[in-house]
Amino acid sequence: MSARRSAVETLPNSETQNCVGSPLNRALLDYFRCPEHSASFELGGELSMAAGFFQFGRDTICYGRCSSAPLASQLTNGLHDAAQDVKCEGRWVHLPFDLSQIIDNLRRERYIANSRASWKKSLAGRASRKAYYFLRPILPVSVRKHLQRAHLKGWDKTPFPHWPLDWTVESILERAMVLVLIAQSLERMPFIWFWPDGAPSCTIMTHDVEAFPGRQFCTELMHLDNSYGIKSSFQIVPEERYKVSQDFLNRIRDQGFEVNVHDLNHDGRLYQDRQEFLRRAKKINQYAKEFQALGFRAGAMYRNLDWYEALEFSYDMSVPNVAHLDPQRGGCCTVMPYFIGDILELPLTTTQDYYLFHIIGDYSTKLWRQQINLVLQKHGLISFIIHPDYIIAKEAQRVYSELLHYLCQLRSEGQTWIALPREVDAWWRERSGMKLVADGAGWRIEGPGSDRARLAYARLEGDQVVYEIE
């Protein structure tokens, strides 16, 4: 008989709760939705007082407190590899860091506080941002792109998050799963698959309507999306940019598309002051009711995740995976949705059309295809921002049509589920409430929406985790 055992034989308390468990285990249990008692992590020592950078295996950068020294105050080469300090005793894995804290630090971009380059850019940017947004309405794209290129100079030299896509969160959690399988001598670990009906990945298409020309192009854009059988969401600026009538919103919804709120007036100042933010948040929440909107995205992807409790939305779409080209640097380093309190974050995992066309200067789908293929490797969320304002030109429409054709091809091949953001939000919330229950020699999934859920297994192949869907 094999030295490794089945999950049913070894996991105590087969009927799980809602994957609460120890705080150290929370990140892994929430991500995989595996049985509550399957993760057995303990701290291997007293955590450092200060946070810093270190590695957890090759090329996997972490930020937080750690019991093994030394930590780096700045992101440099030659970081300490905490993987060498992990110890397994019986079924317990002793980590030199709090796994859930490290994951939260990445998803919430807390590592940015210790990035000197980002701090200097944010400090210098406060004054220039005011001037830029004051002049922006009269600046044509041909002028704006040169100003932005100057501001973004050296973006491609930023070492972290990794360009063109960062899956550090997935790498850390997969390494943690490897340790659990080894420590408990398991052949495989059951978990609830990431997407409904066993879909290998998910795709959402979103359109941020920035100005009047984009508003006027929305009808034609819906026709284009419909021609490929793809429904998308339109993020609408409530004030100052253009007229928003109920008839305009109804035309979007009546065709099966989704309406969300895009900032308040898109002036770049939503998060500059706490009291001003709270004042604006009240108005934004009122517009959410008027628009019948479940989702929100801030203008220019500005964000402060610690203030999200003031927003009354089911989900947000303001955090990039890699923010090298955005005014606010950073990135959540994950290709999966994740909760920020009660709000579900749907991260942006591809480059915006404006940056692709006007900053990088690439009128092709090459970069998008590269990012799509990277997300597919981790079975994540492929999310796009395509502005109606920036695809009015025929060349831009040609590139966007090529992208839609490619996404349709992936869908027909069964490689992705193309959904509205609200459908992804509904699914991820249902999945977070599901549980695995031992059923004889196997497992079954219980909870609302479980009829679309699929049982999957994580197993070792060499020193890597691979997935199998039952």
Image (tube, grey):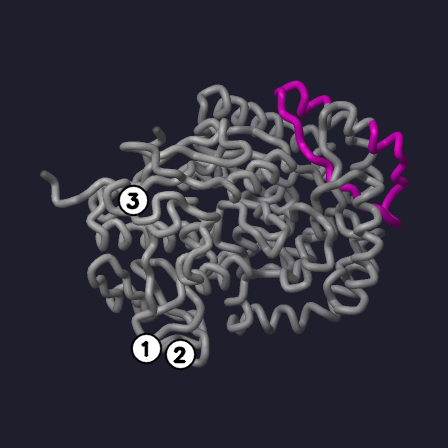
Residue located beneath label 3 in the image: 465
Q: Amino acid at mark 1?
A: Ala
In x, y percent, where is residue 395? 65, 30
In the foreground, 267 or 51: 51
Taking the image as shown, residue 83 lies to the left or right of residue 125, namely: left
Q: Is residue 104 above or below residue 216?
A: below
Q: Earlier in the sequence, mark 3 or mark 1?
A: 1
Decide whether residue 125 is among the magenta residues: no
Q: Earlier in the sequence, mark 3 or mark 2?
A: 2
What residue sits 68% from the left and 54% below the top?
146
What residue sits 44% from the left and 61% below the top?
100
The answer to whether mark 1 and mark 2 are in CB contact below 8 A is: yes
In x, y percent, where is residue 343? 63, 51
Label 1: how many Cα within 10 Å (few below 14, some 14–19, many 20+): some
Residue located beneath label 2 in the image: 48
Quarter of the image that includes the C terminus: top left
Residue numbers of the magenta segment: 223-250
Decide whether residue 235 is among the magenta residues: yes
Residue located beneath label 1 in the image: 69
| Distance from Cα at disc 3 to Cα at disc 2 | 30 Å
Label 2: how many Cα within 10 Å (few below 14, some 14–19, many 20+): some
In x, y percent, where is residue 245? 90, 36
Q: Amino acid at mark 2?
A: Ser
In the foreground, 182 or 281: 182
Q: Earlier in the sequence, mark 1 or mark 2?
A: 2
| Distance from Cα at disc 1 to Cα at disc 2 | 8 Å
Taking the image as shown, residue 273 lies to the left or right of residue 336, namely: right
In the foreground, 252 or 399: 252
Q: Could you tell me which secondary element the residue under label 1 belongs to?
A: loop
| Distance from Cα at disc 3 to Cα at disc 1 | 28 Å
Q: Amino acid at mark 3?
A: Val
Q: Nearer the viewer, mark 1 or mark 2?
A: 2
